[in-house]
């Protein structure tokens, strides 16, 4: 640095010498020679082999560039050093190169090979920086090289290099837009990348290159939503803005069914008529459709995942989320952004400026949102004027009947401010409040009239203009004010105010018949000295007076018109000529003359004083275009909501590991992901195109550890420690996704506390399932009791703990919670954890006694023959598939009939009972779009043509569950509607009984030892001591057949899983006292463990 | 996105320019100068200016205009926030963000700008990453550099950029592991003539200085977290923990940074620690007036109010002021008409008072409104909102048993409250 002052002096010297000598032409040889001389020593330094000299030279050159001085003639000397070993020299050379390569294209090519070499470097950072510089050199010849480099880098191992590749895409695109197609391919590939590092950059590239290719987003939508929180802040802004647009094209408006009432009560007071009409129309349209709105889960996902970002320190991120909520969220939820936006008002004044602009727009549409923060918009004397004026705008927008008095009091103090522009704006604001809120109109008017005697002329002038507008609304009552204003013409000099007064007098001359001609007289006297705008109004006044009171004003009018005829301004001359022809009857003037009065004295509509921010919200908020209220270059229109939602399944991502759960399940799972952890975030639908080698190697990592999504503390700590192992975690996540049941709060809590390992978790879940099942048979008895149906769908998660009467309700509840709770939970608040799709009335032990009693009663006859191979022997429990409330009168129940499904022995037969409780016929009942996970198959039932009101139909469908307890999801369609439903089998229904002799049983059991054997001790309650009850309980819990057994204290059952036909052998051995030992042998360990739980549960009751 | 950046000083010289895409001529700044002329003062230059081919987005910081040139749609806050980040970085590197500092370190500035943006899109804005790439200049280093010929550019590669925690650099080592948290609160109040509070709210920040080795995982809890109404976080803080437990859990960046900023809900009554008695009057015909202001402390829990500064924007008609202060010193700038009174510490025994004569321009009408008084003060060792830090725990580092205790007790809060009052 030591040399740089010297350099400065030298340069200063040369220019001060150079200028007088070589005069005016900077390009003349003189300056060049001095430049040449100066650059000569730089060249020498660059050519030396001392790094320190080179560095010094480069520093001086960069200083020149920074000052905007031309250093291009040093190009050859500098480029030579591109391969310099010294890293700082190298960096500065890059700076130089990027700056001048465009001008010296041929020479720039010399450096390319260095970068190409760099692209192959084993160090990722060198690869990245080589790509960065290479792509920054704007030389068209190297486009193919760049393209190649980008493509290569896009599949680089290192996410950092891939990020750089994403950055390079827009650079190349701006250099040569013909490459678009190829670049889109790269973008598509990078969009699939699952690292947070890349996400922001690639979306940026997407926005610059192909913002119209919204289809590229579909597959990555959920991943982006989930990654969002961990992306760096600049990337967040870009992604959120892009997703706002995306959501507008893909989802339905959440406010379409807003009730008419609410809308109108708010509008009625202040909304302009036009707006009302518009709204009414929209309302009518939506009423016509009148389809209950269900928010797409993906839509909800977006809202939910962006919300925490309101807490970001970065104002741009907060604004981005705010605009997303404003454009996408249901009305009731938009309010959350207000607090964050108000917080931004404490930031730098530039930030305030932008935020206030946006708040002003929002506050017109959603006044209620900012009302609680009214005081935050109070103006400080230290605010810059532009901020003051914006705050005033917001305050005016927020004014309503309740707060107007405080606002007006505040305005009164503002009027005394020393900042005149601000005072003028305040007066305007008072005018707007007065027009909008009828109650205070008179108060405002009086206040404004008082201002007319203000000492400051500007204040008076502004008041006049505003009063004029107010008077136009009800002139008759205010002739006093008009008279008062007429007197002002003597003093007030501001042209706009004078013009306003003259116009008022002219317009309402019949209210002030005596004064008007006098005013005209005075004005005629000073006509030549007036401003143009005033002159025009004098002519108007003259014309109007001539028409109403020609006796007094005829001569005056003539005089004024004559003066105007010779005015310097052609507008005024024209106006005079035109008016003379119109009002003064001559032979030539013709027919128009008769209508002169109508023309001049027509009723004029009162001006609407409205915010300049009205209707600005058709621009995406927070955008440059919104701020300027004009479309900026490259602005992407915010599309309107579609009338019909496009197919939501385009966002489904098929990944082999994931196939066990449907898209719907997946979404729910993800929603609950904890904040702030890469591993969680990255576990979105990861169908990464370029699977990283690391991740591949981790593939085997087992599904251990209770990486539960809702376990906060420990979990997160753990995650922090193992951030590097995110890949590993991800595996777990995926594993978890397979288990949809985890959504239950209860269930997941257990899963955490339970030691570890997926089997145990599944046990827990199964246990829950079992309990549910236990209840069911007795519940069936109380079938008629449907009154408790309405008793909330979420109840099943709250572990209906008590009496048997409640247990009766359970019979219906669990399934209904499945069908309807989905919708409900999605509309609900974030914390709402959706109830499990499976009935888990987990701790209903108290009710057990009654339940078992009842059960015993119901099942006596059937269970007396606990014989083999009788599939239909057991009680048939019905579950609810579609509650009649959720199904709009269509109630659907299902049960597992335990009969083999005709046609396909690998399917579980599900009997479905559909009853039509509506009073219209339901037509074309069918299953639509089954979305089974891989391997799962659904055999639909034949379409039901029509179902008369009150009728019930029963059909059978077959589902191959692949021996898993994952739910099968499908749509149940009628001619008008479709319902998303899912069937989840208890583990006991996944098998069919087999006949076996004791020997066979023992033989098979011998094969299934060790790992495949699960043993559990249990206590048999008193009620469960008899053979009969035990057998009955076991068979009700699972579809198994009894195997004869020699020993009296042993019970054996056997079954085969439906899909794979694996044997499941159950042995129950009674020991002394009431203890017993349960052994299950099965290849399918998961099924085994779940079954153990279920059976123990059943027996414990 | 961001095309070019020009730094302009108050006299309108463009003293630095940087282009990230094709070069944009300096002449584009003429539009800016035009807007600057139109504006009454520097604060009123519109942040966004539209020109035929470009958009100019500017911020004003420390007497420097940062003018960025934009060509296509971009969220304005994005640019504004970034420019402030640039200014913060300069501040961080050079201790001040002034024209001289930038000119003296032009090469570093250029290197910084080069790293912060790539093709107009922010690349590395975290100070930790930047410091790994480009070392801040210190006197010692420049001496060493000139002897050894080494450079300010780090020869290690910025690994921070690759990590999932970009705000923390790897391999931090300290012999003394310390963590400091400064709670700084600001009361913002508008008080009307009669002395009643129109509007008051407390804004606070917690600035931290963390010098801990390795990858510590800290959690900071408060005695009364419910006080915090609205919080914004440094990205390092785990939102979920805060949501569920109201604990700040984070892996801190190395060095100084702002951990959170918060607002205390205005529902809680804010006790304003000072009061002002004022008597300002102008006589109609004599072209003079009287000025008499006394400042006194209100209840403040036994803490002294310090650093009291009062500023008054006097009306235009005021020509000069002849005042006597019982404490501190005052200045009156006849050009801007700003009266500044630096009071210092308030002792309740002897209340500071400033009184005297105001000279008005002869013939000018009497100013109709009394000016508003702006008062700033500080109270050490007191968070005005009553926020209290409960404890600080550290996990995840091996030195925990040895040094953990030292810094928990060390986990010093230095609460001071810097407040400003706005009397109208």
Image: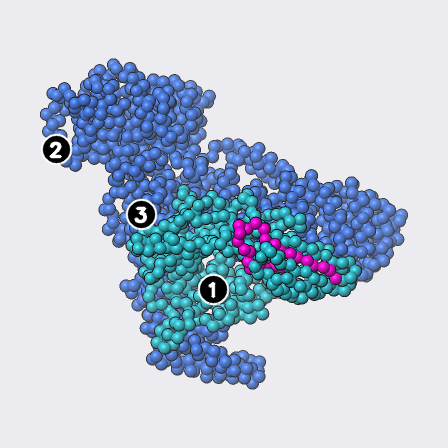
Residue A236, position in %: x, y? Answer: 43, 52
Q: Decide: is A719 above or below B29.
A: above
- Subunit of mark 3? A
Confirm or deny contact between disc 2 and disc 3 (CB under 8 A).
no
User: Quadrant of the rendered structure where residue A854 is?
Assistant: top left
> Magenta segment range?
B288-311
Colour seen for chain B? cyan
**Label drawn at residue A1007:** 2
Disc 2 to disc 3, how far (Cα)?
Answer: 41 Å
- B301 falls in the magenta region: yes
- A162 falls in the magenta region: no
- Subunit of mark 1? B
Magenta span: helix, strand or loop, mainly?
strand
**Label drawn at residue A711:** none
- Between circles 1 and 2, the one closer to the viewer is 1
Q: Nearer the viewer, residue A87 or A274?
A: A87
Residue drawn at 35 percent across, 48 percent down? A677
Residue A861, position in %: x, y? Answer: 25, 14
Element at label 1: helix
Residue drawn at 81 percent across, 60 percent down? A528
Element at label 2: helix
Q: Decide: is B345 above or below A1029.
A: below
Image chain in blue: A
**Label drawn at residue A718:** 3
Q: Which residue is mark 1?
A: B91
């Amino acid at each position: 640095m030591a040399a740089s002052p010297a350099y400065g002096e030298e340069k200063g010297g040369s220019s001060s010498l150079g200028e007088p000598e070589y005069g005016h032409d900077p390009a003349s040889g003189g300056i060049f020679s001095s430049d040449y001389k100066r650059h000569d020593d730089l060249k020498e330094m660059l050519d030396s082999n001392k790094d320190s000299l080179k560095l010094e030279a480069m520093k001086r050159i960069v200083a020149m560039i920074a000052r905007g001085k031309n250093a291009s003639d040093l190009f050859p000397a500098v480029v030579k050093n591109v391969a310099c070993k010294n890293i700082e020299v190298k960096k500065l050379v890059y700076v130089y190169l990027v700056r001048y390569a465009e001008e010296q294209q041929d020479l720039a090519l010399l450096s390319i090979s260095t970068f190409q070499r760099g692209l192959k470097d084993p160090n990722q950072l060198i690869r990245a920086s080589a790509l960065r510089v290479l792509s920054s050199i704007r030389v068209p010849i190297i486009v193919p090289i760049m393209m190649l480099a980008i493509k290569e880098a896009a599949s680089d191992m290192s996410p950092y290099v891939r990020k750089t590749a994403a950055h390079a895409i827009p650079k190349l695109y701006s250099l040569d837009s013909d490459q678009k197609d190829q670049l889109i391919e790269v973008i598509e590939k990078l969009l699939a990348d699952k690292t947070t590092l890349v996400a922001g950059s690639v979306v940026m590239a997407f926005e610059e290159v192909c913002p119209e290719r919204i289809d590229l987003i579909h597959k990555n939508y959920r991943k982006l939503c989930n990654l969002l929180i961990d992306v760096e802040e600049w990337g967040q802004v870009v992604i959120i803005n892009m997703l706002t647009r995306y959501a507008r094209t893909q989802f339905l408006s959440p406010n379409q069914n807003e009730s008419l009432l609410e809308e109108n009560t708010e509008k009625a007071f202040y909304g302009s008529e036009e707006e009302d009409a518009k709204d009414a129309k929209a309302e009518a349209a939506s009423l016509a459709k009148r389809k209950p709105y269900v928010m797409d889960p993906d839509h909800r996902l977006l809202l939910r995942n962006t919300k925490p970002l309101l807490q970001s320190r970065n104002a741009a991120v907060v604004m981005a989320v705010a605009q997303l909520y404003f454009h996408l969220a249901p009305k009731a939820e938009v309010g959350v952004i207000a607090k964050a936006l108000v917080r931004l008002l404490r930031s730098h004044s530039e930030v305030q400026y932008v935020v206030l602009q946006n708040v002003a727009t929002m506050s017109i549409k959603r006044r209620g949102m900012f009302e609680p923060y009214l005081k935050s918009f109070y103006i400080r004397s230290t605010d810059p004027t532009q901020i003051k004026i914006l705050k005033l705008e917001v305050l005016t927008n927020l004014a309503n009947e309740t707060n107007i008095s405080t606002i007006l009091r505040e305005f009164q103090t503002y009027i005394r401010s020393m900042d005149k522009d601000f005072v003028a704006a305040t007066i305007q604001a008072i005018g707007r409040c007065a027009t909008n809120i009828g109650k205070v109109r008179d108060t405002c008017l009086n206040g404004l009239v008082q201002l007319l005697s203000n000492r400051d002329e500007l204040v008076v002038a502004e008041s006049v203009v505003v009063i004029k507008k107010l008077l136009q609304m009800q002139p008759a009552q205010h002739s006093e004010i008009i008279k008062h204003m007429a007197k002002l013409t003597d003093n007030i000099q501001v042209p706009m105010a004078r013009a306003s007064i003259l116009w008022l007098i002219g317009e309402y001359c019949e209210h002030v018949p005596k004064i008007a001609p006098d005013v005209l007289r005075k004005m005629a006297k000073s006509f030549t000295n007036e401003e143009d705008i005033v002159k025009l109004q004098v002519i108007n006044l003259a014309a109007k007076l001539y028409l109403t009171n020609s006796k007094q004003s005829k001569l005056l009018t003539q005089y004024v018109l004559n003066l105007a005829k010779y005015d310097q301004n052609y507008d005024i001359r024209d106006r005079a000529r035109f008016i003379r022809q119109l009002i003064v009857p001559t032979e030539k003037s013709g027919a128009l003359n008769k209508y002169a009065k109508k023309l001049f004295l027509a009723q004029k509509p009162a001006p609407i004083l409205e915010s300049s921010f009205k209707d600005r919200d058709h621009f995406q908020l927070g955008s440059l275009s919104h701020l300027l209220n004009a479309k900026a270059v490259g602005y992407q229109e915010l599309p309107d909501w579609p009338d019909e939602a496009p197919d939501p399944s385009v966002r489904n991502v098929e990944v082999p590991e994931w196939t066990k759960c449907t898209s719907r399940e997946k979404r729910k799972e993800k929603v609950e992901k904890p904040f702030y952890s890469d591993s969680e975030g990255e576990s979105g639908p990861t169908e990464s195109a370029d699977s990283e080698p690391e991740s591949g190697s981790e593939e085997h990592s087992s599904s251990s550890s209770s990486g539960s999504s809702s376990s906060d503390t420990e979990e997160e700590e753990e995650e922090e420690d193992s951030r590097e192992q995110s890949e590993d975690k991800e595996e777990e996540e995926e594993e978890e996704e397979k288990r949809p049941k985890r959504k239950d709060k209860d269930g997941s809590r257990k899963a955490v506390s339970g030691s570890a390992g997926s089997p145990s978790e599944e046990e827990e879940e199964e246990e829950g399932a079992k309990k549910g099942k236990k209840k069911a048979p007795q519940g069936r008895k109380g079938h008629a009791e449907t009154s408790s149906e309405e008793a909330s769908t979420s109840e099943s998660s709250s572990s209906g703990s008590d009496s048997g009467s409640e247990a009766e309700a359970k019979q219906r509840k669990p399934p209904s919670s499945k069908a309807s709770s989905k919708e409900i939970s999605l509309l609900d608040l974030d914390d709402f954890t959706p109830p499990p799709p499976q009935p888990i009335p987990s701790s209903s032990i108290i009710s057990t006694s009654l339940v078992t009693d009842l059960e015993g009663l119901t099942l006596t006859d059937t269970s007396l023959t606990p014989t083999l191979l009788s599939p239909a022997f057991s009680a048939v429990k019905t579950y609810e598939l579609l509650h009649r409330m959720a199904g709009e009168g269509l109630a659907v129940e299902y049960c597992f009939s335990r009969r083999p499904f005709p046609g396909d022995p690998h399917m579980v037969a599900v009997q479905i009972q559909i009853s039509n409780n509506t009073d219209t016929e339901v037509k074309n009942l069918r299953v639509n779009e089954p979305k089974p996970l891989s391997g799962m198959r659904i055999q639909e039932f034949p379409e039901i043509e029509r179902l008369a009101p009150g009728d019930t139909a029963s059909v059978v469908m077959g589902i191959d569950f692949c021996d898993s307890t994952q739910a099968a999801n499908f749509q149940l369609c009628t001619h008008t509607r479709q319902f998303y439903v899912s069937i989840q089998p208890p583990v006991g229904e996944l098998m069919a009984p087999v006949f076996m002799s004791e020997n066979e049983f023992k033989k098979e059991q011998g094969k299934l030892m060790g790992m495949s054997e699960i043993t559990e001790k249990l206590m048999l309650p008193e009620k469960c001591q008899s053979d009969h009850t035990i057998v009955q309980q076991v068979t009700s819990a699972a579809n198994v057949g009894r195997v004869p057994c020699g020993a009296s204290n042993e019970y054996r059952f056997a079954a085969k899983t439906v899909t794979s036909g694996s044997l499941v052998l159950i042995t129950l051995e009674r020991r002394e006292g009431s203890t017993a030992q349960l052994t299950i042998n099965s290849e399918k360990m998961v099924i085994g463990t779940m079954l153990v739980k279920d059976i123990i549960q059943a027996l414990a009751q | 996105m961001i095309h070019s950046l020009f730094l302009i000083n108050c006299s309108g010289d463009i003293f630095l320019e940087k282009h990230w895409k094709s070069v944009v001529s300096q002449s584009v700044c003429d539009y800016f100068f035009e807007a600057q002329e139109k504006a009454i003062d520097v604060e009123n230059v519109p942040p966004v200016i539209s020109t035929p081919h470009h958009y100019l987005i500017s911020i004003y910081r420390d007497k420097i205009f940062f003018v960025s040139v934009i060509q296509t749609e971009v969220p304005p806050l994005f640019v504004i926030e970034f420019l402030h980040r640039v200014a913060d970085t300069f501040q961080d590197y050079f201790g001040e963000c002034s024209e001289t500092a930038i000119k003296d370190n032009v090469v570093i500035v250029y290197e910084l700008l080069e790293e912060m943006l790539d093709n107009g899109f922010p690349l590395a804005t975290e100070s930790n990453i930047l410091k790994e790439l480009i070392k801040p200049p210190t006197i010692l280093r420049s001496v060493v550099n000139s002897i050894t010929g080494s450079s300010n550019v780090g020869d290690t590669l910025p690994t921070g950029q690759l990590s999932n925690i970009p705000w923390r650099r790897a391999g931090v080592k300290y012999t003394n592991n310390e963590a400091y948290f400064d709670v700084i609160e600001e009361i913002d109040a508008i008080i009307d003539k009669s002395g009643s509070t129109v509007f008051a709210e407390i804004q606070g920040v917690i600035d931290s200085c963390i010098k801990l080795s390795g990858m510590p995982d800290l959690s900071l809890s408060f005695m009364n977290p419910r006080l915090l109404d609205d919080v914004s976080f440094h990205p390092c803080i785990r939102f979920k923990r805060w949501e569920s437990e109201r604990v700040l859990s984070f892996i801190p960046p190395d060095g100084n940074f702002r951990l959170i900023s918060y607002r205390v809900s205005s529902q809680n009554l804010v006790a304003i620690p000072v009061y002002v008695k004022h008597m300002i009057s102008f006589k109609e015909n004599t072209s003079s007036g009287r000025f008499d202001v006394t400042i006194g402390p209100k209840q403040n829990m036994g803490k002294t109010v310090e650093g009291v500064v009062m500023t008054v924007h006097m009306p235009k008609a005021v020509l000069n002021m002849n005042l006597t202060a019982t404490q501190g010193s005052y200045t009156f700038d006849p050009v801007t008409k700003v009266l500044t009174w630096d009071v210092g510490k308030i002792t309740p025994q002897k209340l500071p008072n400033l009184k005297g004569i105001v000279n008005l321009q002869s013939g000018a009408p009497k100013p109709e409104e009394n000016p508003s008084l702006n008062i700033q003060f500080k109270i050490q060792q007191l968070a005005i909102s009553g926020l209290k830090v409960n404890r600080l725990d550290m996990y995840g580092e091996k030195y925990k048993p040895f040094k953990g205790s030292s810094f928990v007790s060390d986990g010093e809060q230095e609460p001071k409250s810097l407040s400003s009052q706005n009397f109208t």
